[in-house]
Amino acid sequence: MFWPLDLSKKEAELSVIPKLLETQDQFIAILSVNYSDVDNIFQVVNLSTFPANLFLKHLVVLADVGGEQLMRINSQFGRLFPSGKFRYFQSGRVYSYRFKVLPVSGSLNNDRLGISGKKLLKKHLFSDLLKDVAQILIFGSACENEEATAVLSKCEIGNYLGQPDKLAKFVKQRYIWVSRITGGAQANRLGQIAQDFVKEYLERNLGIPRIRITRNGHLPGVIERENRPVPFDIVVHDYEKYAAVEVSFQVTTNSTIERKAGQAKSRFEQIEQAGYKIAYVIDGAGNFERKNAMRTLCLNSHCTIAFSRNELDVLCEFLRGYLETLGP
């Protein structure tokens, strides 16, 4: 709500959970039909408006299979599926699926499957590779090979195919569990996007030759306990002049913002004594509602701005005023 439009678009490209929740009912509806053959699922998806790679992303998240585990499945394929076939139990019968492509040479990762952030924006049909992986994600926990079953124990959505009520309950409960895992990672990722945006804005608009702008930098002599250098989101410097920029992101926890506020005074005193500067970019309602913490940050900052282009121009003007008398 509070971000520049292009930053919001960039976040949307990388944030997969809202897209999964938006298409959850359609995903459930496809798997609620009692198909005579699992391959019919792939045909239905290919004939629909539902991208096969997005369908696969649902399966990956529900099975809690990340990119690293996919690569291990590929590299250990001979141990998990020694015959090159996937034999699994379903409704009291044993089914056999012969892999079409797996194992593949190189890495079996999210990019290759089209399920990484930006790749999800482009629709893929079910290829032989996506079918092989989907088959594992749907029925992995029912594999005849016990070694494979141990690795793929969470690949259990196949137990609920053609059972709409049980399927919906399983998916929705699993997404509550998944959200607990992805929430912290999502907030961290979005915070990284905000910091990158500020850094890139300064690089484009500061207009001072030879200036260095680094992420996760340090100010000489500014230390915390055990004499460790204090990390700052962004450091702008050249020669003897240094300025730190902290980006306080709106999707944050009380502990995070309270920690920043608690550190602000001691850091400001060290920065003042060294003749440096520190600025804060305050992003969004999640911060504004924490008035005491915000007040502390403002009192211990040389420049405090909100997250918008106009405000970032104010930051550029402040930094130019400080840095314009650089040494030779």
Image: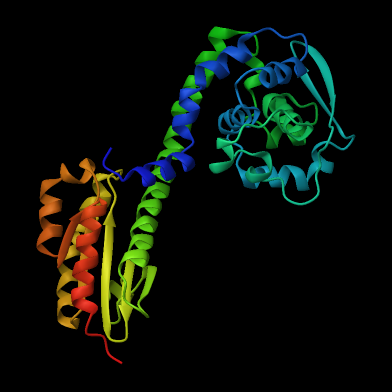
Q: How is the image coloured?
A: rainbow
Query: In terms of depth relative to the viewer, which is nearer, 33 or 126?
Result: 126
Give the image quarter of residue 284: top left
* Position above or below: 79 against 202: above
Q: Residue at x 24, y 45 (%)?
A: 254
Q: Residue at x 84, y 32 (%)?
A: 99
Question: In this orientation, does residue 71 appear?
Answer: yes
Q: Residue at x 75, y 17 (%)?
A: 38
Q: Residue at x 42, y 48 (%)?
A: 189
* Position above or below: 120 against 305: above
* Position above or below: 159 against 273: above
Query: In terms of depth relative to the viewer, which is nearer, 251 or 177?
Result: 251
Q: Is residue 31 left or right of residue 254?
A: right
Q: Residue 259 at x, y = what percent?
A: 24, 56
Q: Residue 291 at x, y = what percent?
A: 11, 47
Q: Residue 94 at x, y = what percent?
A: 82, 17
Give the image quarter of residue 320: bottom left
Q: Residue 47 at x, y = what percent?
A: 68, 17
Give the image quarter of residue 1: top left
Task: List the single residue furthest toward the right.
Answer: 83
Q: Is residue 261 left or right of residue 79?
A: left
Question: In this orientation, does residue 222 appear?
Answer: no
Q: Quadrant of the C terminus?
A: bottom left
